[in-house]
Image (cartoon, rainbow, N blue to C red):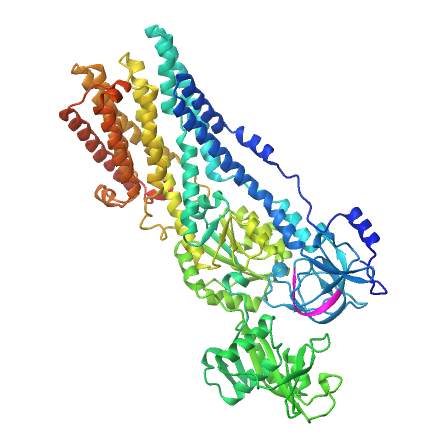
Amino acid sequence: MVAIPADNGGLTTAEATRRLKDEGPNALPRRGSRGFLRIALEVVREPMFALLLGAGAVYLVLGDRLEAIVLFAFASVSVLIAIVQESRSEHVLEALRDVASPRALVIRDGTMQRIAGCDVVRGDTLILGEGDRVPADALLTEAIDLIVDESALTGESVPVRKRAAADDMSAAVPGGEDRPHVFSGTLAVRGQGRAVVTATGPRSEIGRIGEALVGIETVAPRLTVETRRLVRTVALVGLTVSVAAVVLYGLLRGSWLHALLAGIALEMSMLPEEFPLVLTVFMVMGAWRISQARVLTRRASAIETLGAATVLCTDKTGTLTENRMSIAALTVAEETLRADALASPAPAFAELLRFGVLASAPDAIDPMERAFHDLAGKAGLTRQTGLTLAHGWGIAPGLLAVTQVWTAPDGEITVAVKGAVEAVAELCRLDESARTELRAAADGMAGDGMRVLAVAQATCEPNQPLPDTPRDFAFTLLGLVGLVDPLRASVPDAVRDCRSAGIRVVMITGDYPATAQAIARAAGIDAEHVMTGPELEALDDAQLALRIGEVSVFARILPTQKLRIVEALKAAGAVVAMTGDGINDAPSLKAADIGIAMGKRGTDVAREASSIVLLDDDFGSIVRTIRLGRRIYDNLRKAMAYILAVHVPIGGLALLPLMLGLPIIFTPLNIAFLEMVIDPVCSIVFEAEDEEDDVMRRPPRNPKARLFSRGMIASSLFQGALAFAFVAVTYLIALGRGMPETEVRALTFVTLVLANFALVFANRAFGASLLGAFRRHNTALRGVMAVCAVMLGIVLFLPAARDLFHFGPLHADDLAVTAAVALVLLVALEQEKHLWKKRRRHPHPSR
């Protein structure tokens, strides 16, 4: 503990400089942060990057510089995106540092000086005023009606009063009334004070939260891990098959140069470069689509997990509620009037409200006092003109009430007081029976989640000296006022939608249990079981794991306990989305699978630690975002299934001639053309598909389910094998009928392109019929088909292009054959899909 200086001169500049050198700046320390070069080196070591570079090198060897440049560009974009995503996590501590280090007014060398917050040192004397951000943890030596908003640290919606330090000082813990400590990052909303700094930087309360944030490791996105695994497998298989094909071709045909070219074509046909492209496009376009719902996506991993969220942990203050106090009810005698019925209040209620305003600051900053002014304005009540604030008594440890004295031009004195029920009852000198009735009325209002204040009035003779204490006035009780932090209008519907989608909503707040339970009921959250912070603290991890599934309301929770709740839910197998807006929410936001920060009222720390940010602070945006997340994941599965399927006929047709000693179908240029069709289809076309009809009526997918499930892989390989069989039969029949080799190549190539689109239509929707698949609107698909038709026309009918591709001329009957084969294939694929649906009750999550 820092000793309180005997004088008001503060530290000397020399002493402050020495302490700054010895103890470091008033800022959070950096962990071993990774620079640009280190992140880049980690990314380029990934196998996918090596595969892309290898494919580009193959194109360079073949002399196809344009294709090589395109592949190198894909590699560069993938690296850049990975570096950006990795670098974002490095900004969290920077945001904490910015919030924790505002400008500060201190006393040094006997004078007041305004310095940078990072230069504040232990022992500095701070001058605090209304609206000031506290730059460091400090002990108050003076406090004049000082009210501090500590919601960023505690989650409390109501600011707390502070008192000057005494001999019997309490522990330095945020929250609670009449404590002598102020904390870095909190806000003085009323009054003024003087304090001696006790802790700076990492030793402050916010610093400890920052250190907890450093220790949380962000796991790699699940899709990234699965995709890397599949890419390695496919690449290894492709390399093995290509090497075997080169050896086989060389031994059987004797031309090792042609064998090498055939092997390169086969490797290119099996190289899965579409996987990283699809992930990149889906994440970028997904973020754009989500931004249209007024939600900012900060981490791509959130998009892939949105549809799997099983638990939504939400803070109360500023998330479910509007983070502003409002008056809900007025009670006079035994009669209660709801605030929404106050258009023409009876005289007794009007007096109660008018004196509540007189007991508040004229230009209120405190949320409770603003609530009095707001309701009085709506009721048409204004403060009597000509009144002047003559004197006031703030909240004191022995009297939890605010008293204000007003004088009129004729000398009449009006006194108003508002405060704790017990304090106002004492000022009104109520007997025990009256106090019991008053407490019963107050308890009834508190049971509805209200914060209850009592209001009273007194009068004095004109030109009489004011007493030394409010206790000397003869107060008359006017009634009780119940205040609430209003529930956001969109919350009940949003919670209902979450429930229909199988998402459990859990409220975590620092507020009192009764208030939390009332808000939870109003929001539609299960409030049968409530667990408080002390109760949670008494549980070990095993006991918490047993209780975590039945409790949906957590009250009086500390920041470290929020983090523990999130981690317990994750350990139980839940995919956790966590909302928050305060500094205290940063660790749990980062630890959650999906951290959701409030954009307007949220702190920079919360936004930096989160995965997504609600730009309009609308809780309902979460539901819209989850809907989009499910759509994105569904379409991603469709794209991945299509990629697996389409590579089977391409690879099979590249390998078949080698195995049977037949004319080679594909050259590297043919493969490049196919890639020009496949890439936009699997990325842009499938990304633009509309959502499934039941997207918000199905439960969340199993968080342990893999993107590339056995069922999905088996179905895709079967579809690809079916397409390969149809195209291969066409190829073999054409050879058997004696068609020239160039015409066979052209016929087989066109059939394969049309088979590719058959696979597209078969995979566009999980549940739609073939007719429904054709009716589904997708402008991107129409555009790709149109461009592909034009390109096919060029390579088939333009002699120079036809010669470049080694194609022969095709006639109308040949084109009719290719169209017929594709149509029969599409019908067969549709039958396969229906058979699969019969075998599985829920085809979309598991297929």
Residue at x 55% of width, y 77% of height: 373
- Left or right relative to 615: residue 422: right
Q: Position of residue 216 (x, y in %)?
A: 60, 45
Closer to the camera in the image, 23 or 317: 23
Magenta residues span 186-194
Q: In this view, does 644 lie above or below 549?
A: above
Name, please, the residue furthest toward the top. 254
| Percent x, y of residue 774 | 23, 42
Magenta residues, dominant SS class:
strand
Residue 408 image point, x, y percent: 63, 89
Q: How many marks?
A: 0
Q: Is residue 700 in view from this perspective?
A: no
Front-lying residue, 143 or 10: 10
Q: Where 480 falls versus 13 (above or below)?
A: below
Q: Residue placed farthest to the left in the image?
A: 813
Dividing the image into 4 quarters, which one contains the N terminus? bottom right
Q: Is residue 763 visible?
A: yes
Q: Quadrant of the C terminus?
A: top left
